[in-house]
Amino acid sequence: MDPFAIEKKQMITEHLLHRGINDSRILAAFQKIPRHLFVREEYEDSAYTDNPLPIGHGQTISQPYIVAYSLQALALRGDEKILEIGTGSGYQTALLAELTRQVYTVERIPELSDAAKARLDSLGYANITFKTGDGTLGLMESAPFDGIIVSAGAPFVPDSYKNQLTIGGKIVIPVGNEFSQDLLRITRTDENKFSTESLCPCVFVKLIGEQGWRNGTL
Ligand code: SAH
């Protein structure tokens, strides 16, 4: 028995389905994954509300709607290799593991990465590779990726992400200042060609540029 079955159903209907998330694979993944196991015990009762919640170290688990919207923007078919920046609780990582073939996820805070790995191992996921380190660099050793999804707000799109994308691959990333960002989708249409769409306004925690952010490049 799922102790949060009612709350989960309400989340899926009200915050996803009624707001335009219609990809049946995404809805099934949200149905399958126990979001209450990804928040601290004291927030369990709020796990299925459409809010970000604290996960320690000044970070948050992102709200369900924006996670679903970002995943839908990647338009996954199931055979992709995806890079996620900002593992956090590992909730979106689990969704990605349901939706695609191989997931690489990078988190700069070792304690969060370790906790997410333990959680996802215990849920039985075997198609996720965890890395601790500076995600602004992407993950050169495992590139190229069919998609890169960034869970923290950046001042601009790091070149490393563009360079580590397959042709036809997409980056979904919040770009702006620390108070508000635009969710952008960048598609690599050719070796040196990228098209950018602005999808919606959003608010994420900051993507920390460990090497410092410089003008337009890292
Ligand atoms: N998808 C996650 C979101 C966590 S919040 C979830 O729903 O739980 C964003 C995460 O990005 C934080 O854990 C933060 O530590 C991480 N982060 C910030 N800057 C980073 C960087 N340069 N490299 C890797 N991770 C980073």
Image (tube, helix red, strand yellow):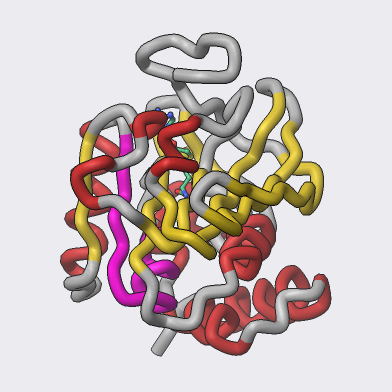
User: Residue at left 78%, top 53%?
Assistant: 199
Ligand 1 in which quarter: top left
**In the rendered view, would you say 99 is above or below 216?**
below
- In this image, 211 relative to 118: left or right? right
Q: Is residue 100 magenta?
A: yes
User: Does residue 39 appear in this view?
Assistant: yes
Q: Position of residue 96 (x, y in %)?
A: 41, 67
Residue farthest front in this picture: 191
| Picture quadrant of residue 36 | bottom left
Q: Which range of residues does the magenta coloring cover?
A: 92-107
Horizontal side of residue 13 vs 95, given as left or right = right
120 in magenta? no
Q: Quadrant of residue 192?
A: top right
Could you say where residue 99 lies in the image, as x and y percent from the top left?
Answer: 43, 77
* Residue 18 image-quadrant placement: bottom right
In the rendered view, tell whether residue 23 sits above or below residue 164: below
Q: Disc count in the image?
A: 0
- Vertical arrangement, residue 196 with respect to residue 102, above or below: above
Whether residue 71 sits left or right of residue 103 in the image: it is: right
**Percent from the top left, x then y, of residue 109?**
29, 30
Q: Which residue is pictured at 37% across the width and 16% down the height?
A: 210
Give the quadrant of the N terminus. bottom left
For the residue pair 82 and 165, the one nearer the viewer reads as: 165
Foreground residue among 161 and 59: 161
Q: Quadrant of the C terminus?
A: top left
Answer whether residue 41 is visible to the viewer in this image. no
Q: Which of 6 and 206 lies nearest the eye of the viewer?
A: 206
- 81 sits left or right of 53 in the view: left
Residue 184 image position (x, y, % from top left): 69, 46
Q: Residue at x 56, y 79 (%)?
A: 26
